[in-house]
Image (cartoon, rainbow, N blue to C red):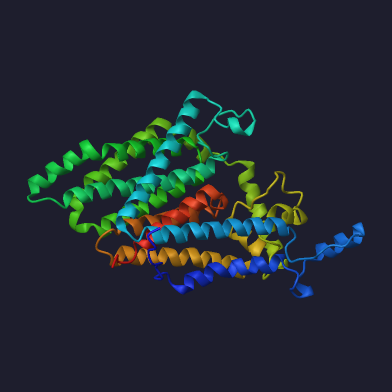
């Protein structure tokens, strides 16, 4: 409404990398591509059913358009947050609301889990609550959302502590103010961390818990290296976070440990699905089978070794290669990687507000690692949350001036 100028500090290479797969999807659903690019299934369908069809590269053009709409929506969320959070006060507001949302979703999931309440009343199905999944049907997906919430809460806690220690006049006064901060200001973030950590462990998601742990460890390393001059004041904060994790782990670790020790049939079967997906990609390495077409396209290559039904590969990188081809998949990976590099540069160069790009770096490790073994980043709720975090991180990777 105030007609603020649009920031153009985002490198053009990032925009180009993002729009390459978008253009490829448009080609997949169009009819003005060379005939040799069209998928032969369309010709086979026309001959077997004796009907006229409009062949395309994609075997599911409608699903490809829906998938493209989602991808553009994630990009638009990133762009809007990038513009909005150039102001550090707005960046702090967004971080706070991400943390608050994460805490409330965790509380919601824990109440349903401990009270055995059917929270999916809108689905019309009777679901037994045996693990925490909050409003997510899949507990593995919620585990990643919980991990993103933890990163925001840890950053929020350290931001509060850092703001209080800026007013230190003498060492004793600094420690007194730090104690006051814990008592009056930090108890809410610490309570949120306790809630989300307990919910995360209670999901019994092995991949989600491990990836979240790695991301939090990376965030801690960045904090320890970057805030070396204030280490005496920040160490109590990190120690308090670690203590809360130990408390949450002691409350709900037994089911998770049992699942880590188990090797399920679906785990070994996923390797077979990975191999079949790689073999299928070799048939269309450049054009792919169509964005969002894995559910239908994989049925062609399914073997007797696969017992379960798979509408996702459980590996986002392989699925993207299957759907939009290797060049398009590589372009998406490079888009995310370039955003992380910008955030990492912001961590190194910025004197103030470096905690925001630090969250972006840790969040990228979280979703990128889990995408190797699952499809959490293909869930809109997680993709939009991650886009918000990266818009915030990249915006604060540049000086406000």
Place of residue 201 in the rendered image (x, y in percent of width and height, measured from the top left)? 44, 38
Is residue 194 among the parts visible in the rendering?
A: yes
**Residue at 19% over, 54% down:** 230
Say above or below: 186 vs 323: above
> Most extreme residue toward the bottom, as rendered?
34
Which one is nearer the viewer's eye here, 151 or 18?
18
Horizontal relation, residue 34 to residue 379: left or right: right
Considering the image in quadrants, where does the C terminus appear? bottom left
**Residue at 67% over, 49% down:** 311
Say above or below: 354 vs 216: below
**Residue at 13% over, 51% down:** 167
Place of residue 37 in the rendered image (x, y in percent of width and height, measured from the top left)? 75, 72
> Most extreme residue toward the right, as rendered?
50
Q: Quadrant of residue 224?
A: bottom left
Considering the image in quadrants, where does the N terminus appear? bottom left
Place of residue 223 in the rendered image (x, y in percent of width and height, measured from the top left)? 29, 55
Which one is nearer the viewer's eye here, 178 or 66?
66
Q: Quadrant of residue 40?
A: bottom right
Horizontal relation, residue 149 to residue 130: left or right: left
Say above or below: 286 vs 273: below
Is residue 361 among the parts visible in the rendering?
A: no
Q: Quadrant of residue 43?
A: bottom right
Q: Report how many numbered discs are placed on residues in the image.
A: 0
Place of residue 76 in the rendered image (x, y in percent of width and height, measured from the top left)? 50, 59
> Most extreme residue toward the top, as rendered?
115
């Amino acid at each position: 409404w105030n007609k603020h100028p649009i920031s153009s500090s985002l490198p053009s290479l990032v925009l180009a990398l993002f729009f390459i797969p978008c253009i490829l999807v448009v080609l997949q659903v169009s009819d003005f591509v060379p005939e040799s690019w069209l998928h032969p299934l369309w010709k086979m369908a026309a001959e077997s059913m004796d009907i006229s069809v409009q062949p395309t590269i994609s075997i599911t053009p409608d699903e490809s358009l829906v998938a493209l709409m989602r991808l553009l929506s994630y990009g638009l969320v990133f762009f809007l947050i990038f513009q909005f959070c150039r102001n550090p006060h707005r960046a702090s507001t967004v971080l706070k609301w991400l943390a608050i949302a994460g805490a409330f979703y965790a509380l919601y999931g824990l109440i349903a889990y401990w009270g055995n309440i059917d929270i999916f009343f809108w689905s019309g199905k009777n679901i037994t609550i045996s693990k925490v999944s909050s409003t997510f049907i899949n507990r593995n997906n919620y585990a990643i959302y919980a991990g993103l919430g933890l990163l925001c809460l840890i950053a929020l806690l350290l931001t509060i502590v850092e703001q209080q220690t800026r007013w230190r006049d003498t060492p004793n006064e600094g420690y007194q103010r730090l104690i006051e901060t814990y008592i009056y200001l930090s108890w809410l973030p610490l309570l949120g961390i306790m809630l989300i950590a307990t919910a995360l462990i209670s999901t019994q998601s092995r991949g989600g818990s491990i990836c979240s742990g790695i991301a939090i460890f990376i965030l801690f390393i960045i904090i320890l290296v970057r805030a070396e001059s204030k280490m005496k004041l920040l160490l109590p904060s990190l120690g308090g976070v670690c203590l809360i994790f130990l408390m949450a782990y002691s409350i709900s670790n037994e089911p998770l440990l049992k699942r880590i020790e188990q090797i399920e049939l679906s785990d070994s079967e996923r390797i077979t699905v990975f191999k079949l997906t790689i073999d299928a990609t070799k048939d269309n390495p450049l054009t792919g089978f169509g964005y969002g077409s894995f559910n239908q396209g994989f049925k062609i290559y399914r073997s007797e070794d696969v017992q379960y039904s798979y509408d996702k590969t459980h590996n986002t990188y392989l699925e993207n290669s299957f759907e939009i081809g290797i060049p398009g998949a590589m372009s998406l990976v490079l888009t995310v990687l370039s955003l992380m590099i910008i955030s990492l540069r912001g961590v190194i160069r910025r004197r103030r507000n470096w905690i925001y790009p630090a969250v972006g770096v840790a969040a990228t490790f979280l979703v990128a690692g889990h995408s190797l073994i699952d499809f959490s980043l293909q869930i809109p709720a997680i993709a939009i949350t991650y886009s918000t975090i990266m818009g915030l991180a990249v915006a604060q990777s540049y000086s406000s001036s």
